[in-house]
Image (cartoon, helix red, strand yellow):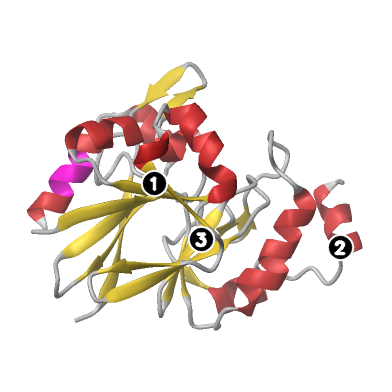
């Protein structure tokens, strides 16, 4: 018994009839305490009643929401002419504290319309209790200024910072290529090789990887200098 990470895929595990959700291939995660039966949801979006139903069917009590970054496909909002359900819908059905990095707070509020009272802003390195266990918040800017990953004793939920075989885009408003380079090479690459990687999207032929596999196979994790990184990224 311990802390678990449960991976849910949009268009398959929830939002089954939503073609756009399936196309975007977002992962939502439940991080929870198996013994206490409490959990937090990572990046709830697309089908909030469906996600809550999964929580309830597992006999879990939802105690919070963890946000990797403020883009609408992860927190709800409007994108590409579509409206995506997200945090506001969660707060109306199952109000909980929403945990964000302090550099992402304004973006989350703007995209979702959440109030200051809905959000708890964190520094990188903060830890959040889930039952008898803790999750460490790693500030990993690059894709957005306040992107963060969630580290357990054996797993990393990486949002749009690190993918299997890739990394998040750095050509969007608020993105920063040099920040991404540092997040990958000075933060995530320092994690134990056996750390299981749970990415923010289903972009690969397998749903999970390890930090060791990414360090050996992912070109974005194998860059030796900022100059080489800028050449790869076209900066």
On screen, residue 185 versus residue 36, left or right, reads right
Residue 204 seen in render: yes
- Determine the residue positioned at 63% across, 55% down: 167
Q: Name the chief secondary structure element in magenta.
A: helix
Q: What stretch is highlighted in magenta?
A: 50-54
Look at the numbered disc 3 and give the secondary structure of its residue: strand
Image position, residue 157 (x, y; %): 45, 62
For residue 173, which numbered disc appears in the image? Answer: none
For residue 226, which numbered disc appears in the image? Answer: 2
Q: Residues within 10 Å of mark 1 (few under 14, many from 20)?
A: many
Q: How far apart are marks 2 and 1 (CA)?
A: 30 Å
Tag count in the figure?
3
Q: Residues within 10 Å of mark 2 (few under 14, many from 20)?
A: some
Looking at the picture, tell me which residue is in the foreground, 146 or 167: 146
On screen, residue 230 versus residue 3, left or right, reads right
Looking at the image, is 105 positioned above or below residue 19? below
Image position, residue 211 (x, y; %): 55, 74
For residue 43, which numbered disc appears in the image? Answer: 1
On screen, residue 82 versus residue 146, left or right, reads left
Look at the numbered disc 2 and give the secondary structure of its residue: helix
Q: Name the residue under label 3.
A: 149
Label 3 near label 1: C-beta < 8 Å?
A: no
Look at the numbered disc 1 and give the secondary structure of its residue: loop
């Amino acid at each position: 018994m311990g802390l678990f990470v449960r991976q849910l895929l949009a268009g398959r595990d929830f939002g089954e009839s939503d073609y756009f959700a399936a196309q975007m291939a977002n992962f939502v995660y439940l991080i929870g305490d198996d013994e206490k039966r409490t959990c937090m949801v990572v990046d709830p979006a697309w089908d909030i009643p469906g996600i809550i139903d999964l929580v309830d069917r597992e006999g879990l009590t939802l105690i919070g929401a963890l946000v990797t970054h403020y883009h609408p496909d992860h927190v709800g909002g409007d994108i590409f002419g579509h409206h995506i359900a997200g945090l506001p819908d969660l707060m109306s059905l199952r109000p909980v504290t929403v945990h964000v990095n302090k550099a992402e707070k304004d973006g989350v509020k703007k995209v979702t319309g959440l109030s200051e009272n809905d959000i708890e802003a964190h520094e990188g390195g903060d830890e959040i209790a889930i039952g008898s266990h803790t999750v460490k918040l790693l500030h990993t800017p690059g894709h957005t200024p306040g992107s963060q990953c969630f580290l357990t004793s054996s797993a990393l939920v990486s949002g749009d910072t690190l993918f299997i075989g890739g990394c998040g885009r750095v050509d969007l408003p608020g993105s920063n290529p040099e920040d991404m380079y540092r997040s990958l090479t000075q933060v995530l690459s320092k994690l134990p090789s056996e750390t299981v990687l749970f990415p923010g999207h289903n972009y690969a032929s397998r749903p999970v990887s390890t930090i060791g596999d990414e360090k050996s196979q992912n070109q974005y994790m194998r860059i030796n200098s900022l100059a080489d990184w800028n050449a790869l990224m076209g900066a």
